[in-house]
Protein backbone atom coordinates (compact mmCIF):
# COMPACT_ATOMS: atom_id res chain seq x y z
CA UNK A 1 0.00 0.00 0.00
CA UNK A 2 1.41 3.37 -0.85
CA UNK A 3 2.62 5.74 1.81
CA UNK A 4 0.36 8.51 0.44
CA UNK A 5 -2.68 6.46 1.07
CA UNK A 6 -1.74 6.00 4.68
CA UNK A 7 -1.36 9.72 5.20
CA UNK A 8 -4.46 10.70 3.35
CA UNK A 9 -7.05 9.63 5.82
CA UNK A 10 -6.35 12.49 8.17
CA UNK A 11 -6.38 15.50 5.86
CA UNK A 12 -8.01 18.08 8.09
CA UNK A 13 -5.71 17.73 11.04
CA UNK A 14 -5.67 20.78 13.28
CA UNK A 15 -2.43 22.23 12.07
CA UNK A 16 -0.33 22.62 15.16
CA UNK A 17 0.88 25.83 16.60
CA UNK A 18 4.28 26.18 14.89
CA UNK A 19 5.83 26.65 18.30
CA UNK A 20 4.53 23.28 19.48
CA UNK A 21 7.65 21.18 19.79
CA UNK A 22 8.19 17.68 18.52
CA UNK A 23 8.02 16.43 22.10
CA UNK A 24 4.66 18.11 22.64
CA UNK A 25 3.33 16.67 19.40
CA UNK A 26 4.47 13.21 20.36
CA UNK A 27 2.93 13.63 23.80
CA UNK A 28 -0.31 14.55 22.08
CA UNK A 29 -0.12 11.55 19.77
CA UNK A 30 0.42 9.35 22.79
CA UNK A 31 -2.62 10.80 24.50
CA UNK A 32 -4.91 10.58 21.50
CA UNK A 33 -3.83 7.38 19.84
CA UNK A 34 -2.01 5.21 22.34
CA UNK A 35 -4.99 2.99 23.06
CA UNK A 36 -5.62 2.36 19.36
CA UNK A 37 -1.95 1.69 18.79
CA UNK A 38 -1.73 -0.82 21.65
CA UNK A 39 -4.92 -2.55 20.47
CA UNK A 40 -3.58 -2.91 16.97
CA UNK A 41 -0.18 -4.16 18.11
CA UNK A 42 -1.76 -6.63 20.53
CA UNK A 43 -3.74 -8.01 17.66
CA UNK A 44 -0.58 -8.62 15.67
CA UNK A 45 1.72 -9.76 18.44
CA UNK A 46 -0.85 -11.62 20.54
CA UNK A 47 0.77 -10.18 23.62
CA UNK A 48 -0.12 -7.04 25.50
CA UNK A 49 3.33 -6.97 27.00
CA UNK A 50 5.08 -7.03 23.62
CA UNK A 51 2.58 -4.53 22.23
CA UNK A 52 3.50 -2.05 24.95
CA UNK A 53 7.21 -2.54 24.39
CA UNK A 54 6.89 -2.04 20.65
CA UNK A 55 4.70 1.05 21.11
CA UNK A 56 7.20 2.55 23.50
CA UNK A 57 10.04 1.96 21.09
CA UNK A 58 7.99 3.50 18.28
CA UNK A 59 7.56 6.71 20.30
CA UNK A 60 11.27 6.87 20.99
CA UNK A 61 12.08 6.42 17.29
CA UNK A 62 9.50 9.01 16.37
CA UNK A 63 11.24 11.53 18.62
CA UNK A 64 14.48 10.88 16.80
CA UNK A 65 12.97 10.96 13.31
CA UNK A 66 14.28 13.68 11.02
CA UNK A 67 10.98 14.57 9.38
CA UNK A 68 8.54 17.50 9.32
CA UNK A 69 6.63 18.11 12.50
CA UNK A 70 3.08 18.14 11.09
CA UNK A 71 0.88 16.21 13.46
CA UNK A 72 -0.94 14.28 10.73
CA UNK A 73 2.34 13.10 9.22
CA UNK A 74 3.74 12.17 12.59
CA UNK A 75 0.76 9.98 13.27
CA UNK A 76 1.15 8.00 10.09
CA UNK A 77 4.88 7.68 10.82
CA UNK A 78 4.06 6.44 14.31
CA UNK A 79 1.78 3.69 13.04
CA UNK A 80 4.19 2.80 10.24
CA UNK A 81 7.17 2.59 12.58
CA UNK A 82 5.17 0.51 15.05
CA UNK A 83 3.98 -1.87 12.35
CA UNK A 84 7.55 -2.32 11.10
CA UNK A 85 8.84 -2.95 14.62
CA UNK A 86 6.06 -5.50 15.09
CA UNK A 87 7.14 -7.31 11.92
CA UNK A 88 10.74 -7.36 13.17
CA UNK A 89 9.61 -8.79 16.45
CA UNK A 90 7.49 -11.47 14.81
CA UNK A 91 10.49 -12.51 12.73
CA UNK A 92 12.71 -12.76 15.79
CA UNK A 93 10.26 -14.84 17.70
CA UNK A 94 10.16 -18.51 16.91
CA UNK A 95 6.66 -19.58 15.98
CA UNK A 96 6.30 -22.07 18.77
CA UNK A 97 7.85 -19.86 21.40
CA UNK A 98 5.13 -17.26 21.71
CA UNK A 99 2.16 -18.67 19.86
CA UNK A 100 0.21 -18.85 23.09
CA UNK A 101 1.86 -15.81 24.66
CA UNK A 102 -1.27 -14.10 25.80
CA UNK A 103 -2.81 -17.24 27.24
CA UNK A 104 0.35 -17.81 29.19
CA UNK A 105 0.22 -14.27 30.50
CA UNK A 106 -3.39 -14.70 31.54
CA UNK A 107 -3.16 -18.12 33.06
CA UNK A 108 0.17 -17.93 34.77
CA UNK A 109 -1.48 -15.55 37.16
CA UNK A 110 -3.98 -18.23 38.04
CA UNK A 111 -1.26 -20.77 38.56
CA UNK A 112 0.85 -18.57 40.85
CA UNK A 113 -2.06 -18.10 43.23
CA UNK A 114 -1.39 -20.38 46.13
CA UNK A 115 -4.75 -20.19 47.87
CA UNK A 116 -6.94 -22.86 46.31
CA UNK A 117 -10.11 -20.90 47.00
CA UNK A 118 -8.81 -17.90 45.11
CA UNK A 119 -7.64 -20.02 42.25
CA UNK A 120 -11.03 -21.68 41.96
CA UNK A 121 -12.84 -18.36 41.90
CA UNK A 122 -10.52 -16.73 39.44
CA UNK A 123 -10.70 -19.57 36.98
CA UNK A 124 -14.44 -19.65 37.48
CA UNK A 125 -14.64 -16.14 36.06
CA UNK A 126 -12.79 -17.18 32.93
CA UNK A 127 -14.71 -20.41 32.69
CA UNK A 128 -17.90 -18.34 32.73
CA UNK A 129 -16.87 -16.54 29.56
CA UNK A 130 -15.78 -19.74 27.92
CA UNK A 131 -18.94 -21.58 28.99
CA UNK A 132 -21.02 -18.90 27.29
CA UNK A 133 -19.55 -20.11 24.01
CA UNK A 134 -21.17 -23.49 24.60
CA UNK A 135 -24.60 -21.86 24.54
CA UNK A 136 -24.12 -20.90 20.89
CA UNK A 137 -25.25 -22.85 17.80
CA UNK A 138 -22.78 -25.59 16.74
CA UNK A 139 -21.61 -23.85 13.55
CA UNK A 140 -20.93 -20.68 15.50
CA UNK A 141 -19.01 -22.66 18.14
CA UNK A 142 -16.93 -24.45 15.56
CA UNK A 143 -16.12 -21.18 13.78
CA UNK A 144 -14.97 -19.58 17.04
CA UNK A 145 -12.93 -22.64 18.01
CA UNK A 146 -11.12 -22.63 14.67
CA UNK A 147 -10.50 -18.88 14.90
CA UNK A 148 -9.48 -18.63 18.52
CA UNK A 149 -7.66 -21.89 19.16
CA UNK A 150 -6.54 -23.10 15.71
CA UNK A 151 -5.69 -19.61 14.49
CA UNK A 152 -7.60 -20.18 11.24
CA UNK A 153 -8.38 -17.27 8.89
CA UNK A 154 -11.91 -16.36 7.91
CA UNK A 155 -11.38 -17.93 4.45
CA UNK A 156 -10.13 -21.19 5.98
CA UNK A 157 -13.12 -21.38 8.30
CA UNK A 158 -15.45 -20.67 5.38
CA UNK A 159 -13.93 -23.60 3.50
CA UNK A 160 -14.26 -25.83 6.55
CA UNK A 161 -17.89 -24.98 7.18
CA UNK A 162 -18.85 -24.67 3.51
CA UNK A 163 -20.30 -21.17 3.94
CA UNK A 164 -19.39 -17.67 2.72
CA UNK A 165 -16.74 -15.47 4.36
CA UNK A 166 -19.48 -13.08 5.31
CA UNK A 167 -21.32 -15.84 7.18
CA UNK A 168 -18.13 -16.73 9.08
CA UNK A 169 -17.66 -13.12 10.17
CA UNK A 170 -21.28 -13.13 11.24
CA UNK A 171 -20.72 -16.26 13.38
CA UNK A 172 -17.56 -14.86 14.98
CA UNK A 173 -19.07 -11.45 15.67
CA UNK A 174 -22.12 -13.11 17.16
CA UNK A 175 -19.98 -15.16 19.54
CA UNK A 176 -18.13 -12.06 20.76
CA UNK A 177 -21.23 -9.91 21.24
CA UNK A 178 -23.14 -12.80 22.84
CA UNK A 179 -20.42 -13.22 25.51
CA UNK A 180 -20.48 -9.47 26.20
CA UNK A 181 -24.25 -9.49 26.66
CA UNK A 182 -23.98 -12.44 29.04
CA UNK A 183 -21.22 -10.63 30.96
CA UNK A 184 -23.50 -7.64 31.30
CA UNK A 185 -26.02 -9.86 33.04
CA UNK A 186 -28.33 -10.93 30.21
CA UNK A 187 -29.86 -14.41 30.54
CA UNK A 188 -29.31 -16.95 27.77
CA UNK A 189 -32.76 -16.23 26.38
CA UNK A 190 -32.35 -12.45 26.50
CA UNK A 191 -28.96 -12.60 24.81
CA UNK A 192 -30.21 -14.88 22.03
CA UNK A 193 -33.30 -12.73 21.60
CA UNK A 194 -31.22 -9.57 21.18
CA UNK A 195 -29.05 -11.17 18.53
CA UNK A 196 -31.92 -12.42 16.38
CA UNK A 197 -32.27 -10.58 13.14
CA UNK B 1 -30.00 -5.80 39.65
CA UNK B 2 -27.95 -5.87 36.51
CA UNK B 3 -26.01 -3.51 34.34
CA UNK B 4 -28.19 -1.76 31.75
CA UNK B 5 -28.60 -3.72 28.55
CA UNK B 6 -27.31 -1.95 25.47
CA UNK B 7 -29.82 -0.06 23.36
CA UNK B 8 -30.33 -1.24 19.78
CA UNK B 9 -27.94 1.45 18.65
CA UNK B 10 -25.28 0.39 21.15
CA UNK B 11 -25.76 -3.25 20.20
CA UNK B 12 -25.21 -2.35 16.58
CA UNK B 13 -22.00 -0.56 17.51
CA UNK B 14 -20.82 -3.64 19.45
CA UNK B 15 -21.45 -5.74 16.35
CA UNK B 16 -19.59 -3.32 14.12
CA UNK B 17 -16.69 -3.30 16.61
CA UNK B 18 -16.56 -7.12 16.62
CA UNK B 19 -16.57 -7.14 12.83
CA UNK B 20 -13.62 -4.73 12.74
CA UNK B 21 -11.72 -6.99 15.14
CA UNK B 22 -12.26 -10.01 12.91
CA UNK B 23 -11.32 -8.14 9.74
CA UNK B 24 -8.16 -6.72 11.30
CA UNK B 25 -7.13 -10.08 12.72
CA UNK B 26 -7.20 -11.48 9.20
CA UNK B 27 -5.04 -8.72 7.71
CA UNK B 28 -3.30 -6.59 10.36
CA UNK B 29 -0.64 -5.59 7.82
CA UNK B 30 -3.17 -4.09 5.40
CA UNK B 31 -2.45 -0.37 5.75
CA UNK B 32 -5.60 0.75 3.97
CA UNK B 33 -7.68 -1.36 6.34
CA UNK B 34 -5.82 -0.02 9.37
CA UNK B 35 -6.32 3.53 8.10
CA UNK B 36 -10.05 2.97 7.68
CA UNK B 37 -10.21 1.41 11.15
CA UNK B 38 -8.43 4.40 12.71
CA UNK B 39 -10.88 6.72 11.03
CA UNK B 40 -13.75 4.69 12.46
CA UNK B 41 -12.10 4.88 15.91
CA UNK B 42 -12.03 8.65 15.65
CA UNK B 43 -15.63 9.03 14.57
CA UNK B 44 -16.88 8.23 18.06
CA UNK B 45 -14.86 7.66 21.24
CA UNK B 46 -17.16 4.74 22.10
CA UNK B 47 -16.02 2.87 19.01
CA UNK B 48 -12.57 2.11 20.35
CA UNK B 49 -13.99 1.21 23.77
CA UNK B 50 -16.27 -1.34 22.12
CA UNK B 51 -13.42 -2.61 20.00
CA UNK B 52 -11.27 -3.12 23.12
CA UNK B 53 -14.14 -4.86 24.89
CA UNK B 54 -14.53 -7.28 21.97
CA UNK B 55 -10.77 -7.83 21.92
CA UNK B 56 -10.71 -8.57 25.66
CA UNK B 57 -13.50 -11.10 25.34
CA UNK B 58 -11.75 -12.73 22.40
CA UNK B 59 -8.63 -13.19 24.51
CA UNK B 60 -10.49 -14.32 27.61
CA UNK B 61 -12.70 -16.83 25.79
CA UNK B 62 -10.41 -19.83 25.69
CA UNK B 63 -12.38 -23.06 25.44
CA UNK B 64 -10.04 -25.20 27.58
CA UNK B 65 -8.12 -23.15 30.14
CA UNK B 66 -6.50 -26.17 31.80
CA UNK B 67 -4.69 -27.00 28.56
CA UNK B 68 -2.59 -23.86 28.71
CA UNK B 69 -2.06 -23.58 32.42
CA UNK B 70 1.26 -25.40 32.28
CA UNK B 71 2.73 -23.02 29.74
CA UNK B 72 4.05 -20.41 32.09
CA UNK B 73 6.58 -17.81 31.10
CA UNK B 74 7.62 -14.55 32.71
CA UNK B 75 5.80 -13.01 35.65
CA UNK B 76 3.84 -9.88 34.91
CA UNK B 77 4.20 -6.97 37.24
CA UNK B 78 0.69 -5.60 36.86
CA UNK B 79 -1.02 -8.87 37.68
CA UNK B 80 1.34 -9.59 40.55
CA UNK B 81 0.62 -6.24 42.00
CA UNK B 82 -3.11 -6.74 41.89
CA UNK B 83 -2.73 -10.01 43.72
CA UNK B 84 -0.47 -8.42 46.31
CA UNK B 85 -2.79 -5.53 47.06
CA UNK B 86 -5.91 -7.65 47.45
CA UNK B 87 -6.98 -7.69 51.06
CA UNK B 88 -10.65 -8.38 50.61
CA UNK B 89 -13.05 -11.24 50.73
CA UNK B 90 -12.83 -13.94 48.09
CA UNK B 91 -15.76 -12.65 46.06
CA UNK B 92 -14.11 -9.34 45.40
CA UNK B 93 -10.83 -11.01 44.66
CA UNK B 94 -12.57 -12.80 41.83
CA UNK B 95 -13.87 -9.51 40.54
CA UNK B 96 -10.46 -7.88 40.74
CA UNK B 97 -8.69 -10.72 39.03
CA UNK B 98 -11.26 -11.13 36.35
CA UNK B 99 -11.14 -7.41 35.77
CA UNK B 100 -7.40 -7.46 35.41
CA UNK B 101 -7.55 -10.34 33.00
CA UNK B 102 -10.11 -8.60 30.86
CA UNK B 103 -8.63 -5.18 31.16
CA UNK B 104 -5.09 -5.86 30.16
CA UNK B 105 -5.89 -3.73 27.11
CA UNK B 106 -6.34 -0.05 27.78
CA UNK B 107 -9.37 0.31 29.96
CA UNK B 108 -12.42 -1.87 30.16
CA UNK B 109 -15.00 -3.26 32.49
CA UNK B 110 -16.30 -6.40 34.03
CA UNK B 111 -19.31 -7.54 35.95
CA UNK B 112 -19.45 -10.88 37.63
CA UNK B 113 -20.88 -10.65 41.07
CA UNK B 114 -24.33 -9.72 42.25
CA UNK B 115 -25.06 -8.98 45.86
CA UNK B 116 -28.40 -8.31 47.46
CA UNK B 117 -29.51 -4.67 46.99
CA UNK B 118 -26.18 -3.69 45.51
CA UNK B 119 -25.35 -3.14 41.90
CA UNK B 120 -22.58 -5.44 40.70
CA UNK B 121 -19.09 -4.26 41.56
CA UNK B 122 -17.06 -3.22 38.60
CA UNK B 123 -13.36 -2.72 38.27
CA UNK B 124 -11.66 -0.48 35.77
CA UNK B 125 -7.93 -0.81 35.28
CA UNK B 126 -5.10 0.30 33.05
CA UNK B 127 -1.79 -1.35 32.31
CA UNK B 128 1.67 0.12 32.82
CA UNK B 129 2.18 2.94 30.33
CA UNK B 130 -1.47 3.07 29.23
CA UNK B 131 -4.10 5.57 30.32
CA UNK B 132 -7.81 5.36 29.58
CA UNK B 133 -11.27 6.69 30.30
CA UNK B 134 -14.65 5.15 30.96
CA UNK B 135 -18.22 6.12 31.68
CA UNK B 136 -19.34 4.85 35.09
CA UNK B 137 -22.83 3.36 35.51
CA UNK B 138 -24.25 6.65 36.86
CA UNK B 139 -22.97 8.73 33.96
CA UNK B 140 -19.93 10.09 35.79
CA UNK B 141 -16.69 9.86 33.85
CA UNK B 142 -13.36 8.59 35.09
CA UNK B 143 -9.97 9.04 33.48
CA UNK B 144 -7.35 6.62 34.73
CA UNK B 145 -3.62 7.20 34.85
CA UNK B 146 -1.27 4.36 33.90
CA UNK B 147 -1.15 1.23 36.08
CA UNK B 148 -4.18 2.31 38.07
CA UNK B 149 -7.36 0.62 39.18
CA UNK B 150 -10.68 1.73 40.65
CA UNK B 151 -13.64 -0.38 41.76
CA UNK B 152 -17.25 0.83 42.01
CA UNK B 153 -19.61 -0.30 44.76
CA UNK B 154 -22.92 1.35 43.96
CA UNK B 155 -26.09 1.02 45.99
CA UNK B 156 -29.44 2.76 45.65
CA UNK B 157 -28.35 5.29 48.30
CA UNK B 158 -24.76 6.04 47.42
CA UNK B 159 -22.09 5.77 44.77
CA UNK B 160 -18.92 4.40 46.39
CA UNK B 161 -15.72 4.15 44.40
CA UNK B 162 -12.41 2.90 45.68
CA UNK B 163 -9.09 3.99 44.19
CA UNK B 164 -7.27 0.68 44.61
CA UNK B 165 -3.97 2.03 43.35
CA UNK B 166 -2.64 4.71 41.05
CA UNK B 167 -4.41 7.87 39.96
CA UNK B 168 -7.88 8.82 38.75
CA UNK B 169 -9.65 12.00 37.64
CA UNK B 170 -13.41 12.03 38.23
CA UNK B 171 -16.04 14.20 36.52
CA UNK B 172 -19.06 13.51 38.70
CA UNK B 173 -22.61 13.76 37.41
CA UNK B 174 -24.91 15.64 39.80
CA UNK B 175 -27.23 13.57 41.98
CA UNK B 176 -27.85 15.17 45.40
CA UNK B 177 -29.87 12.11 46.51
CA UNK B 178 -26.94 9.83 45.97
CA UNK B 179 -23.56 11.16 47.10
CA UNK B 180 -20.43 10.20 45.22
CA UNK B 181 -17.80 8.87 47.66
CA UNK B 182 -14.24 8.08 46.71
CA UNK B 183 -12.12 6.06 49.12
CA UNK B 184 -8.34 6.15 48.79
CA UNK B 185 -6.61 4.35 51.63
CA UNK B 186 -7.37 6.14 54.87
CA UNK B 187 -9.10 9.02 53.13
CA UNK B 188 -12.61 9.48 51.86
CA UNK B 189 -13.61 12.22 49.41
CA UNK B 190 -17.28 13.21 49.15
CA UNK B 191 -18.52 15.04 46.06
CA UNK B 192 -21.90 16.06 44.77
CA UNK B 193 -21.27 17.37 41.26
CA UNK B 194 -17.66 18.25 40.63
CA UNK B 195 -14.37 17.26 39.00
CA UNK B 196 -11.31 16.25 40.96
CA UNK B 197 -8.17 14.13 40.85
CA UNK B 198 -7.08 11.49 43.39
CA UNK B 199 -3.56 10.05 43.51
CA UNK B 200 -2.89 7.24 45.92
CA UNK B 201 0.52 6.25 47.20
CA UNK B 202 1.09 3.71 49.95
CA UNK B 203 1.39 6.32 52.69
CA UNK B 204 0.08 9.44 51.03
CA UNK B 205 -3.04 10.62 49.22
CA UNK B 206 -3.18 13.75 47.05
CA UNK B 207 -6.58 15.22 46.15
CA UNK B 208 -6.91 18.21 43.80
CA UNK B 209 -10.15 19.88 42.71
CA UNK B 210 -10.72 21.48 39.31
CA UNK B 211 -14.48 22.18 39.55
CA UNK B 212 -16.98 22.60 42.38
CA UNK B 213 -15.97 21.37 45.81
CA UNK B 214 -15.46 18.21 47.80
CA UNK B 215 -15.18 17.24 51.45
CA UNK B 216 -12.35 15.13 52.82
CA UNK B 217 -12.97 12.73 55.68
CA UNK B 218 -11.78 9.46 57.23
CA UNK B 219 -12.52 6.35 55.22
CA UNK B 220 -14.35 4.20 57.76
CA UNK B 221 -14.10 1.17 55.46
CA UNK B 222 -10.32 1.36 55.41
CA UNK B 223 -9.04 -2.07 56.32
CA UNK B 224 -5.70 -1.09 57.82
CA UNK B 225 -6.65 -1.62 61.45
CA UNK B 226 -3.04 -1.57 62.65
CA UNK B 227 -3.48 2.05 63.61
CA UNK B 228 -6.34 4.51 63.73
CA UNK B 229 -6.72 7.02 60.90
CA UNK B 230 -8.61 10.07 62.03
CA UNK B 231 -8.98 12.70 59.35
CA UNK B 232 -10.78 15.85 60.41
CA UNK B 233 -13.51 16.85 57.92
CA UNK B 234 -11.81 19.27 55.51
CA UNK B 235 -13.56 21.18 52.73
CA UNK B 236 -11.64 21.61 49.50
CA UNK B 237 -12.63 23.77 46.56
CA UNK B 238 -11.64 24.30 42.95
CA UNK B 239 -8.01 25.39 42.68
CA UNK B 240 -7.02 23.69 45.93
CA UNK B 241 -4.95 20.59 46.57
CA UNK B 242 -4.76 18.56 49.78
CA UNK B 243 -1.92 16.23 50.68
CA UNK B 244 -2.61 13.64 53.36
CA UNK B 245 0.46 12.17 54.98
CA UNK B 246 -0.23 8.79 56.57
CA UNK B 247 2.76 8.71 58.89
CA UNK B 248 2.12 12.11 60.44
CA UNK B 249 -1.63 11.81 59.88
CA UNK B 250 -1.77 15.42 58.80
CA UNK B 251 -3.42 17.23 55.91
CA UNK B 252 -1.83 20.17 54.15
CA UNK B 253 -3.94 22.31 51.84
CA UNK B 254 -2.36 24.54 49.20
CA UNK B 255 -3.55 26.29 46.07
CA UNK B 256 -2.91 24.77 42.64
CA UNK B 257 -3.36 26.08 39.09
CA UNK B 258 -6.50 24.63 37.57
CA UNK B 259 -4.54 23.51 34.52
CA UNK B 260 -2.21 21.50 36.77
CA UNK B 261 -4.93 19.54 38.57
CA UNK B 262 -4.65 16.46 36.37
CA UNK B 263 -1.99 17.40 33.86
CA UNK B 264 -1.07 13.71 33.55
CA UNK B 265 -4.05 13.51 31.22
CA UNK B 266 -1.96 15.51 28.78
CA UNK B 267 1.17 13.46 29.28
CA UNK B 268 2.76 15.77 31.87
CA UNK B 269 3.44 14.71 35.46
CA UNK B 270 3.84 17.83 37.60
CA UNK B 271 5.15 18.02 41.14
CA UNK B 272 5.71 20.62 43.80
CA UNK B 273 7.90 19.51 46.72
CA UNK B 274 7.00 15.87 46.18
CA UNK B 275 9.36 13.37 47.84
CA UNK B 276 11.47 11.77 45.10
CA UNK B 277 10.39 8.31 46.24
CA UNK B 278 6.77 9.14 45.41
CA UNK B 279 7.75 10.58 42.03
CA UNK B 280 9.53 7.31 41.26
CA UNK B 281 6.39 5.35 42.21
CA UNK B 282 4.48 7.38 39.62
CA UNK B 283 7.16 7.03 36.95
CA UNK B 284 6.98 3.26 37.40
CA UNK B 285 3.34 3.40 36.37
CA UNK B 286 4.38 4.79 33.00
CA UNK B 287 7.72 3.10 32.36
CA UNK B 288 8.43 -0.41 31.11
CA UNK B 289 11.58 -0.87 33.21
CA UNK B 290 11.29 -0.96 36.96
CA UNK B 291 12.90 2.05 38.64
CA UNK B 292 14.27 1.43 42.12
CA UNK B 293 15.25 3.98 44.72
CA UNK B 294 16.54 2.15 47.76
CA UNK B 295 18.29 4.97 49.62
CA UNK B 296 16.00 6.52 52.24
CA UNK B 297 17.65 9.94 52.15
CA UNK B 298 17.26 10.19 48.38
CA UNK B 299 13.62 9.10 48.63
CA UNK B 300 12.90 11.96 50.98
CA UNK B 301 14.41 14.70 48.81
CA UNK B 302 11.75 17.06 47.48
CA UNK B 303 11.27 17.25 43.72
CA UNK B 304 9.65 20.19 41.95
CA UNK B 305 9.20 20.06 38.19
CA UNK B 306 7.51 18.39 35.24
CA UNK B 307 8.13 15.03 33.58
CA UNK B 308 6.76 13.99 30.17
CA UNK B 309 5.32 10.54 30.66
CA UNK B 310 6.59 9.53 27.22
CA UNK B 311 10.14 10.74 27.93
CA UNK B 312 10.99 9.24 31.27
CA UNK B 313 14.48 8.27 30.08
CA UNK B 314 15.32 11.94 29.61
CA UNK B 315 13.81 12.82 32.96
CA UNK B 316 15.92 10.23 34.79
CA UNK B 317 19.09 11.58 33.26
CA UNK B 318 18.04 15.10 34.12
CA UNK B 319 17.72 14.01 37.75
CA UNK B 320 21.43 13.20 37.78
CA UNK B 321 22.13 16.87 37.21
CA UNK B 322 19.85 18.08 39.99
CA UNK B 323 20.19 15.52 42.77
CA UNK B 324 23.29 13.93 44.29
CA UNK B 325 22.52 10.65 42.60
CA UNK B 326 23.72 8.45 39.79
CA UNK B 327 21.80 6.08 37.55
CA UNK B 328 22.76 2.43 37.26
CA UNK B 329 21.01 0.57 34.43
CA UNK B 330 20.46 -3.19 34.49
CA UNK B 331 18.64 -5.32 31.95
CA UNK B 332 15.52 -5.52 34.10
CA UNK B 333 15.68 -2.36 36.24
CA UNK B 334 17.16 1.06 36.77
CA UNK B 335 18.58 1.97 40.16
CA UNK B 336 18.99 5.47 41.54
CA UNK B 337 21.97 5.41 43.88
CA UNK B 338 23.49 8.11 46.09
CA UNK B 339 26.51 9.70 44.45
CA UNK B 340 29.90 9.76 46.12
Image (cartoon, rainbow, N blue to C red):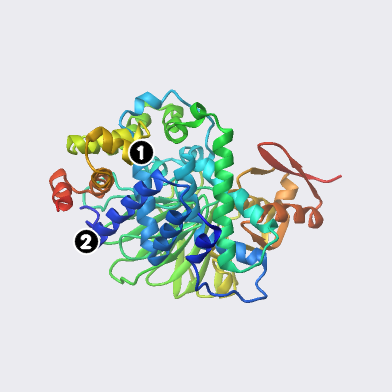
Counting from the top left corner in percent of width and height, residue A186 is at 19, 49
A78 above or below B59?
below
A95 above or below B102?
above
Q: Is residue A77 visible?
A: yes
Residue under numbered circle 1: A153
Q: Is residue B231 visible?
A: no
Counting from the top left corner in percent of width and height, residue B168 is at 48, 59
Residue at the far right: name it. Answer: B340
The verdict on a common chain for dots 2 and 1 is no
Residue under numbered circle 2: B7
Counting from the top left corner in percent of width and height, residue A89 is at 57, 39
**SS for dot 1:** loop
Left or right: residue A134 versus residue B159 is left
Identify the subunit bearing mark 2.
B
Q: Nearer the viewer, residue A106 or A102?
A: A102
Counting from the top left corner in percent of width and height, residue A142 is at 24, 33
Identify the subunit bearing mark 1.
A
Amino acid sequence: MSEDRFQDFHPSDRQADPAESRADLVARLFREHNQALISLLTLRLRSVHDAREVAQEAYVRLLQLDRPDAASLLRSYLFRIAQNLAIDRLRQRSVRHRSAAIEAELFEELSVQDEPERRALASEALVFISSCLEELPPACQRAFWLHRVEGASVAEIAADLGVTDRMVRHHLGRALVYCQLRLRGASKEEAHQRLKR
Amino acid sequence: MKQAMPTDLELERMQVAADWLIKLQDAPEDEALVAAWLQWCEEDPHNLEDFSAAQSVWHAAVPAPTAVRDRVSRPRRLLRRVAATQRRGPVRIAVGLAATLLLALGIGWTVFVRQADELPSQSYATAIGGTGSALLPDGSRVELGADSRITTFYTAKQRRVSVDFGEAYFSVSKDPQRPFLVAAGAMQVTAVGTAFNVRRHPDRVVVAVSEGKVELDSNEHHDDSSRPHEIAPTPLQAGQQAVYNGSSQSIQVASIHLADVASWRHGVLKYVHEPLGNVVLDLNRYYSKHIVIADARLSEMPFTGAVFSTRIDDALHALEGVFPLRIQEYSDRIELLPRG
